[in-house]
Image (cartoon, rainbow, N blue to C red):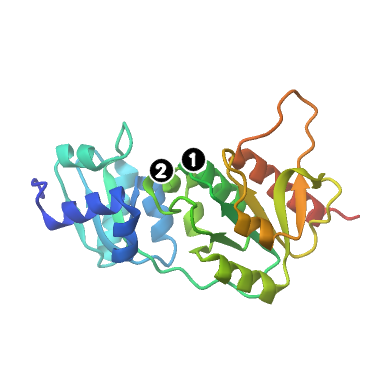
């Protein structure tokens, strides 16, 4: 059992949980909890190590047994260390270090999400969760958007990370993808055309800007159309997670319509 905070594995987990720079340099990130660890285990993600304590429930214990049977390194740690590492008030007793091992951006794209300058982890996680639910084929993360593999984004995404190709890219790289796939780029904007009137059945990329700052200049240059959500209430805007979700589900509605 690991009982020291000075253990190299504990130091690695702490670094990966705390800083995006560490995650980029190590090519790894940390998931917490039974559900997210299960989601990763059911995919093609490579485990570096799994840490757990004695608070695991029966479902967690079965998961640990399965991971061990696959030759994955699993170690028990003290409850105090688990609590010090956990990003939640009630730790579930398991952490896993995973390597970035996603497949490349697929070809023949027709439904892409670009969350631009989204800095709130909850909003980004919500967007990723809705993207997975609506069949988005790829999420392209531009500069100045929060790290998609930060702990709070992973938790808010509820497993979406393991169902979606999520790629951090420069604006030049994003433009290359959009051009190659001939995607119509719609920027969510209050001055845009109503989403009920815009044709979202065509190959599209939806750009969702931040609530505080809106879309970046790079996003505005890339966009060739603006789209808005009609609102009959007293509010002028929605939060980025909700707005993006509404637009993605409107695209699904249109694509499933017989008209």
What secondary structure is marked by label 2? helix
**Residue 177 visible somewhere in the drawing:** yes
Judging depth in this view, the residue of 134 and 187 nearest the camera is 187
Name the residue that disc number 1 marks. Answer: 122
In the depicted structure, whether residue 61 falls above or below residue 141: above
Q: Quadrant of the C terminus?
A: bottom right
Residue placed at 13% from the left, 57% from the top? 8
In the displayed structure, would residue 100 be above or below residue 160? below
Q: Which residue is mark 2?
A: 152
Q: Which mark is residue 107?
A: none
The answer to which quarter of the image holds residue 43 is bottom left
Give the number of callouts.
Answer: 2
In this image, 184 relative to 129: left or right?
A: right
Give residue 167's position: percent from left, percent from top: 50, 64
Count residues near mark 1 (Cα–Cα under 10 Å), then give few for <14, some for 14-19, many for 20+: some
Displayed quadrant of residue 172: bottom right
Q: Residue furthest right?
A: 259
Q: For the view shown, which residue lies furthest in the top direction?
A: 234
Q: Earlier in the sequence, mark 2 or mark 1?
A: 1
Nearest the eye: 255 or 42: 255
Q: Position of residue 76 (x, y in %)?
A: 16, 50
Q: In the rendered image, which quarter is residue 112 located in?
A: bottom right
Residue at 31% x, 32% y is: 90
Instruction: Judge the density around disc 2: few (<14), some (14-19), many (≥20) Cα neighbours within 10 Å.
Output: some
- Relative image position of residue 5 (x, y in whole percent): 11, 46
What's the distance in space between the residues labelled 2 and 1, CA to CA?
Answer: 7 Å
Q: CB of mark 2 within 8 Å of CB of mark 1?
A: yes
Q: Is residue 61 visible?
A: no
- Element at label 1: helix
Point 29% across, 58% down: residue: 22
Give the camera-side residue of 14 and 49: 14
């Amino acid at each position: 059992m690991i009982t020291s905070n000075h253990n190299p594995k504990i130091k690695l987990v702490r670094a990966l949980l705390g800083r995006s720079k560490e995650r980029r340099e190590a090519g790894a990130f940390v998931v917490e909890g039974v559900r997210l660890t299960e989601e990763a285990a059911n995919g093609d993600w490579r485990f570096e190590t799994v840490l757990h304590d004695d608070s695991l429930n029966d479902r967690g214990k079965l998961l640990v047994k399965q991971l061990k049977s696959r030759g994955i390194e699993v170690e028990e740690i003290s409850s105090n260390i688990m609590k010090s590492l956990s990003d939640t008030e009630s730790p579930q007793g398991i952490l896993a270090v995973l390597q970035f091992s996603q497949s490349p951006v697929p070809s023949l794209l027709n439904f892409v999400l670009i969350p631009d300058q989204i800095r709130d982890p909850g909003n980004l996680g919500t967007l990723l969760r809705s993207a997975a639910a609506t069949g988005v084929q790829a999420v392209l993360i531009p500069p100045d958007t929060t790290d998609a593999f930060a702990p709070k984004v992973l938790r808010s995404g509820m497993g979406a990370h393991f169902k979606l190709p999520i790629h951090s890219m420069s604006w030049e790289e994003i433009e290359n993808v959009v051009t190659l796939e001939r995607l119509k780029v719609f920027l969510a904007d209050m001055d845009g055309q109503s989403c009920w009137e815009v044709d979202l059945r065509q190959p599209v990329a939806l750009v969702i800007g931040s609530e505080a700052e809106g879309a970046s200049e790079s996003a505005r240059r890339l966009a060739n159309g603006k789209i808005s959500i009609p609102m009959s209430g007293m509010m002028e805007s929605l939060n980025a997670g909700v707005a993006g979700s509404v637009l993605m589900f409107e695209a699904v509605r249109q694509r499933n319509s017989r008209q």
